[in-house]
């Protein structure tokens, strides 16, 4: 009985130490991601990312995913796709994230208008879609999208997307 209790204590202490080490490693990873995300691009300013989506829930999930991934960005939210090109033009973000399906202008129309402006052609564009349609993906590629993703269905999916966006912005 004494040996069994000693074994349990040893295992519990080992698990506790491993959990403490894991939390320490997670803290270091988050700190490194935040440091990497806050590196200045070009002019020393914090990176601007414009997200155009008529769905507040999708925007909030994207914001949570980016924050969880340690992003230090200025996320500019546009709910009215009719104003998207003007906001992208005035803000000149390093990345524009466009929803495909929106009421005024769809993401394809916004992408086409952005690519038509000589001053905006260098802005990278990520299109997020609820659709898995290959036709939509091909249409986006023909219009000059840099990256096309289907919207995640879970918070973990948005966390992964946030990490991928940080990596994409720094590439």
Image: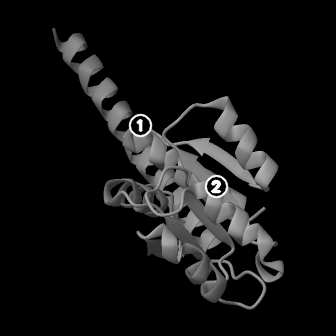
**What is the CA distance from the residue labelled 1 to the residue labelled 2?**
22 Å
Question: Which picture quadrant has residue 49?
Answer: bottom right
Quarter of the image for residue 150 reads: top right
User: Which label's residue is closer to the chain start, 1 or 2?
Assistant: 2
Q: Secondary structure at mark 2?
A: helix
Q: Residue at x 67, y 78 (%)?
A: 39
Residue positioned 53% across, 55% down in the render: 162
Q: Residue 153: which disc? A: 1
Residue placed most toward the observer, 11 or 36: 36
Q: Is residue 149 above or below residue 126?
A: above
Which is more toward the observer, 134 or 122? 134
Quarter containing the N terminus? top left
**Nearest the camera: 15 or 159?**
159
In the drawing, does residue 2 fall left or right of residue 119? left
**Element assignment for label 1:** loop
Q: Mark 2 — residue?
A: 108
Quadrant for the C terminus, please: bottom right
Image position, residue 86 (x, y; %): 59, 82
Q: Residue at x 42, y 62 (%)?
A: 63
- Above or below: residue 42 compared with residue 152: below
Asked where in the image residue 11 lies, by quadrant, the reply is: top left
User: Measuring 68% from the left and 62% from the top, which residue is drawn there?
Assistant: 111
Q: Residues within 10 Å of mark 1 (few under 14, many from 20)?
A: few
In the displayed structure, does residue 16 sit left or right of residue 162? Answer: left
Name the spot of residue 85 as percent of width and height, x first: 61, 76
Residue 40 placement, left or right of 60: right
């Amino acid at each position: 009985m004494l040996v069994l209790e000693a074994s349990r204590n040893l295992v519990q202490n080992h698990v506790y130490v491993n959990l403490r080490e894991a939390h320490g490693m997670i803290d270091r990873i988050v700190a490194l991601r935040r440091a990497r995300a806050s590196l200045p691009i070009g002019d020393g300013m914090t990176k601007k990312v414009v997200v155009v989506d008529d769905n507040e829930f999708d925007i909030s999930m994207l914001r949570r995913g980016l924050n969880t991934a340690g992003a230090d960005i200025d996320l500019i939210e546009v709910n009215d796709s009719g104003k998207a090109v003007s906001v992208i033009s005035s803000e000149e973000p390093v990345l524009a994230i466009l929803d495909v399906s929106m009421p005024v202008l769809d993401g394809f129309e916004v992408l086409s208008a952005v690519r038509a402006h000589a001053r905006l052609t260098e802005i990278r564009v990520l299109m997020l879609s609820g659709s898995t349609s290959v036709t939509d993906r091909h249409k986006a590629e023909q219009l000059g999208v840099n990256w096309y993703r289907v919207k995640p269905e879970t918070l973990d999916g948005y966390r992964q997307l946030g990490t991928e966006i940080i990596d994409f912005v720094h590439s």
